[in-house]
Image (cartoon, grey):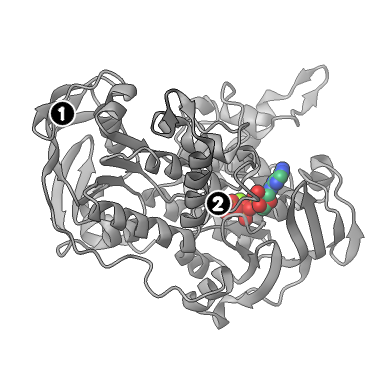
């Protein structure tokens, strides 16, 4: 059912916002109706997060007007937004990890009964909200012991406790694996049925057609168009978003496996990884599929020397026993992960330093960094990866999420790695840049690099892998060739039951 005609809840008109050196938004319009899922689409750095931060009171606008049910309103801070019934779920959750679920749901709003807090009410009401969301964990659970998907549900519960009329979700599915997506979609639809308006930001194009009623596209901080989902195709959306047609997202792979790069034999790690064996040849992309907790990340952390393990490994035929990531890097292995902070992105420093810090040796002569050479290299990466930044001197913390991820890739590319381990390499990256990263991966393999890719996005696993290892409960349960693999077969092995077939379309 399309909700393009309901009562208008919030309207943003002619919104403008400038940061030093960056015009982040100019003339942007957005209208959200009651009970509508409104998708917000645009490339990395297009201004999506900035726009919703203006609505949630995190930033103030420089230009334009906001209307609530037709009346002009000013949102000066998060308290104003809350008073208007606006709740936001950011990518980095705002949960207090040492508190329980119920305490988090009521954080900052604990009801009093006389001089003390009315805990009975807190727990009862929390339970009611969780039941409404179809959640079974106890309200007394410490938040720190919940999975990411569960923490997200607590965030949603928190907003429901506050009479939310407009819920803003900034890339909610980026942190979830395939298995948890259905639950999120179910919750979004149930909120919609209660008349809540939802702004949904995503880089997963399929979701827009699964969930949204309308979609607004931004490009370079400017308003492009608003379309009803019924009247737009995926190709049209991509074109509106990246300004050109995107023929093939995935490169046509023509793998020619060469020398043996990495052999992994009977590798185990306490309870997390059991008896894993596989190998990787030059020129290959081996994809690892599986649900959260299947042991993929744990396995590659051992290969990268970050965690202890038992078993045997060889690189180019020689025994390889990494004691630390530094050790692994010396052997030509790189680990690219989705967690930008954990992989040592120096957020307060600029693009140049972040790109070249690991490869300073190559750029140095007699210990002196050759600045000109460094600048050429950084500019090359900015161009090749289409990193959106005013220049090499821009501070990374002010870049959009997807562009930060590109800086991480640039860093590894700059040091001439032979074995790339990529753990969710394109999470949070827009479809245009994704296809560029896939192209880079393809090019790398042509130069003799081998790539191990972990991904929870099945289209990506199927589109890029020459061979697919499906992991479940710490072990490889199936190896599939590219020809044998479909979303359904992969999911079935990943969850080990028939239920996989129902998840595969997500
Ligand atoms: N606090 C800030 N200071 C300076 N520039 C900023 C700041 N916040 C955002 N920007 C810039 O504004 C532009 C829009 O960023 P924004 O985070 O809104 O993009 P986005 O569409 O959410 O991208 P992504 O899909 O990568 O999350 C970018 O060029 C970004 O670098
Ligand atoms: Mg963003």
In percent of width and height, residue 268 lies at 17, 26
Task: Say if 457 sits above or below 281 in the image.
Answer: below
**Kind of element beneath mark 1:** strand
Task: Say if 227 sits above or below 104 in the image.
Answer: below
49 on left or right of 491:
right
Query: Pointer 2: residues within 10 angstroms few (<14), some, or many (20+)?
Result: many
In percent of width and height, residue 241 lies at 57, 69
Quarter of the picture containing the C terminus is bottom left
Foreground tag (1 vs 2): 1
230 on left or right of 414:
right
Task: Say if 148 sits above or below 7 in the image.
Answer: above
Residue name at image x 70 percent, y 77 percent: 5
Earlier in the chain: of badge 1 and badge 2, it is 2
Return the residue nearer the eye: 506 or 370: 370
5 on left or right of 268:
right
C-alpha span from label 1 to label 2: 35 Å
Tell me: is circle 2 under 8 Å from ligand 2.
yes
Give the labeled residue for mark 2: 171
Q: Which mark is residue 444?
A: none
Residue name at image x 42 percent, y 24 percent: 366
In percent of width and height, residue 274 lies at 17, 30
Query: Pointer 1: residues within 10 angstroms few (<14), some, or many (20+)?
Result: many
* Farthest bottom residue in view: 231
* Farthest front residue in view: 366
**Kind of element beneath mark 2:** loop
Give the labeled residue for mark 1: 267
Return the residue nearer the eye: 177 or 45: 45
In percent of width and height, residue 316 lies at 12, 35
Q: Quadrant of residue 361?
A: top left
Quarter of the picture containing the N terminus is bottom right
Return the residue nearer the eye: 23 or 229: 23
């Amino acid at each position: 059912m399309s909700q393009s005609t309901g009562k208008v809840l919030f309207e943003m008109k002619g919104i403008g916002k400038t940061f030093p050196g960056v015009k982040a938004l100019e003339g942007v319009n957005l209208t959200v109706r009651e009970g509508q899922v409104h998708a917000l689409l645009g490339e990395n750095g297009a201004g999506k997060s900035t726009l919703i931060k203006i609505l949630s009171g995190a930033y103030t606008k420089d230009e334009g007007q906001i209307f609530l049910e037709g009346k002009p309103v000013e949102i000066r801070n998060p308290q104003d937004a809350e008073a208007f019934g606006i709740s936001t779920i950011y990518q980095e959750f705002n949960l207090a990890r040492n508190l329980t679920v119920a305490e988090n749901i009521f954080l900052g709003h604990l009801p009093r009964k006389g001089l003390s807090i009315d805990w009975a009410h807190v727990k009862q009401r929390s339970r009611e909200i969780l039941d409404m969301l179809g959640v079974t964990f106890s309200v007394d659970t410490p938040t720190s012991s919940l999975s990411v998907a569960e923490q997200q549900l607590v965030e949603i519960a928190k907003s429901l406790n506050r009479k939310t009329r407009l819920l803003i979700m900034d890339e909610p599915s980026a942190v979830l694996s395939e298995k948890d997506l259905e639950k999120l979609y179910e919750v979004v639809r149930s909120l919609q049925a209660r008349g809540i308006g939802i702004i949904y930001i995503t880089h997963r194009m399929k979701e827009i057609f699964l969930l949204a009623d309308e979609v607004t596209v931004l490009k370079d901080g400017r308003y492009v168009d608003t379309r009803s989902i019924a009247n737009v195709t995926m190709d049209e959306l991509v074109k509106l978003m990246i300004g050109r047609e995107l023929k093939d997202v995935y490169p046509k792979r023509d793998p020619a496996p060469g020398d043996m790069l990495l052999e992994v034999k009977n590798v185990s790690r306490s309870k997390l990884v059991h008896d894993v064996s596989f190998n990787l040849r030059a020129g290959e992309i081996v994809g690892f599929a599986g649900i959260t907790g299947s042991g993929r990340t744990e396995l590659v952390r051992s290969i990268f020397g970050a965690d202890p393990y038992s078993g045997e490994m060889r690189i180019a035929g020689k025994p390889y026993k990494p004691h630390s990531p530094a050790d692994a890097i010396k052997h030509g292995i790189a680990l690219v992960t989705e967690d930008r902070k954990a992989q040592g992105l120096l957020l307060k420093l600029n693009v140049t330093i972040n790109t070249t810090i690991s490869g300073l040796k190559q750029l140095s002569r007699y210990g002196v960094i050759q600045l000109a050479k460094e600048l050429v290299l950084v500019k090359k990466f900015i161009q090749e990866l289409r990193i959106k930044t005013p220049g090499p001197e821009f501070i990374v913390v002010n870049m959009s999420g997807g562009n930060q991820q590109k800086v991480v890739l640039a860093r590894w590319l700059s040091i001439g790695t032979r074995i790339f381990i990529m753990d969710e390499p394109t999470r949070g990256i827009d479809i245009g840049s994704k296809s560029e990263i896939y192209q880079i991966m393809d090019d790398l393999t042509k130069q003799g690099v081998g790539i191990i890719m972990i991904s929870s996005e099945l289209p990506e696993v199927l589109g890029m892998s020459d061979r697919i290892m499906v992991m479940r409960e710490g072990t490889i349960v199936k190896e599939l060739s590219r020809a044998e693999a479909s979303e359904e077969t992969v999911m079935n092995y990943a969850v080990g039951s028939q239920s996989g077939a129902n998840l595969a379309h997500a």
